[in-house]
Image (cartoon, grey):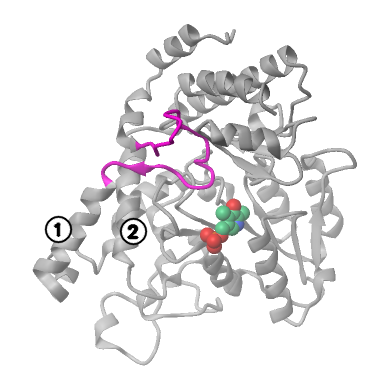
Amino acid sequence: MEYQFSREFAQQCDREDPLRKFREAFIFPKHHSGNCLYFTGNSLGLQPKAVKRYLDEELEDWANFGVEGHTDSRRPWLPYHEFFSESLAKLAGGKPSEVVCMGSLTTNLHLLMVSFFRPVGKRTKILCEAKAFPSDQYALKSQLRFHGLDNSHLIEVAPREGAATLNEDDILDAIAKHGDTIAMLMMGGVNYYTGQVFDMAKITAAAKAKGIVVGWDLAHGMGNVPLSLHDWGVDFAAWCSYKYLNAGPGAVAGIFVHETHHNQSDIPRFEGWWGHDKATRFAMPETFVPIPTAEAWQLSNAPVLSMAPLRASLDIFDQTNFSELQEKTRKLAGYLEFVLETISKEERAAFSLITPKNWAARSCQVSVHTGQYGKGLFDALTARGVIADWREPNVIRMAPVPLYNSFEDIYQFGITLKEALQHV
Ligand SMILES: *Cc1c(COP(=O)(O)O)cnc(C)c1O
């Protein structure tokens, strides 16, 4: 499409945007400049207006019912996590029985690796991407140590010399070359730094063909890119809910476990009473009988107050679908890229995108190298109400989110950027 750097053009795109009504469902932070351009939905999604009502209802039900709220409240707390499965299954591309809302991301990764990282014989290695999000690196390395293995068992695929993003062929080559010694592949489906989206279907298929167990960290994938975890044959996945799922700081996370692993008696797992068969849970039998779904991985009863905001956000996702979301994602991120390129030319700034150019390998995140400008430019933007994210040494990450960002936000960002450049 032919983009133009003008307010009229941006407003016209907003008028034609089938998702525009959802912007009204979110609360934008206020900034003293009067300008608030929020582009950090990849770090903390905005608060849906309905969150307050959902939370109030739980507080009222707790006040009115006390312990009986477990069974008698509007959304009974006993099965509370079940009220999320349909919506999460749609986003994950799995069956409702394959997903559970529970725990926190890094905790869940560990719980899942107890089941899915089982080094035996010469198959002892983990394949991951170099410079994975630090928490994932810590989790992987501590899992290795837990099994008495050192870091030489971690195969990290790095970008080629001079490249910012990974060449997918290098991942496939590593699978082909080291496949027989790899126990598990665990990668971020969408790279948090560059925004690169991996071909999860292809990588999963290649790894499975070599007998490798496959897990994806979808912290930046869930609610951002279309997923088909079931059909791709992914063994397990985990995500957090405070980024693109807009469920608030530290919100309860979620997992996917493929149904081929349900009801398996030989799978190692750290167990708790909320994973035990619902029919006999309160009889408190001595022997654990797993629920025949991904719920078997739950340990504790649902943290209702931390989950209620996610329900408000999923109600919004339920009213849309990924073909609409993705279409806007591309148009919006493409507009941001166009505005950055236009201004870079006009101002002789050497901005360059480190996000891949190919739409199959990117989502709404745009990571830009600020050329001759460093943190000073980022600070000048922040002072003018642009909420973006700075990454050392010289990268600004921005994620215009299709549910609540507008084309006019991008235009206004361009105006603000031009002004900020006069002051650095
Ligand atoms: C955001 C993010 C995390 C954060 O982990 P928490 O356990 O939720 O604090 C972990 N891994 C990746 C890839 C992330 O993007």
Residue 128 position, x and y percent, is 73, 57
Q: Is residue 183 magenta?
A: no
The residue drawn where x is 71% and y is 61% is 211
The crowding category of the residue bearing disc 2, from other C-alpha atoms within 10 Å (few below 14, some 14 to 19, many at least 20), is many
Instruction: Tell me if I can see residue 57 in this picture.
Output: yes
Ligand 1 rendered quadrant: bottom right
Q: Is residue 57 above or below residue 93?
A: below
The residue tagged 2 is: 307
Q: Amino acid at mark 2?
A: Met
Q: Is residue 238 above or below residue 67?
A: above
Depth check, front residue: 352 or 120: 352
Q: Is residue 130 above or below residue 273?
A: above
Label 1: which secondary element: loop
Q: CA distance from mark 1 to mark 2?
A: 15 Å
The residue tagged 1 is: 74
Question: Which quarter of the rendering shows the C terminus?
Answer: top right
The quadrant in which residue 5 appears is top right
Does the Cβ of the disc 2 residue fall within 8 Å of ligand 1? no
Q: Which residue is most to the front?
A: 423
Q: Which residue is most to the bottom?
A: 286
Instruction: Tell me if I can see residue 293 in this picture.
Output: no
The residue drawn where x is 36% and y is 23% is 20
Residue 300 position, x and y percent, is 37, 75
The quadrant in which residue 187 appears is bottom right
Depth check, front residue: 371 or 164: 371
The quadrant in which residue 251 appears is bottom left
Residue 332 position, x and y percent, is 53, 23
What is the magenta segment's predominant secondary structure? loop
The magenta span reads: 27-50
Q: Amino acid at mark 1?
A: Arg
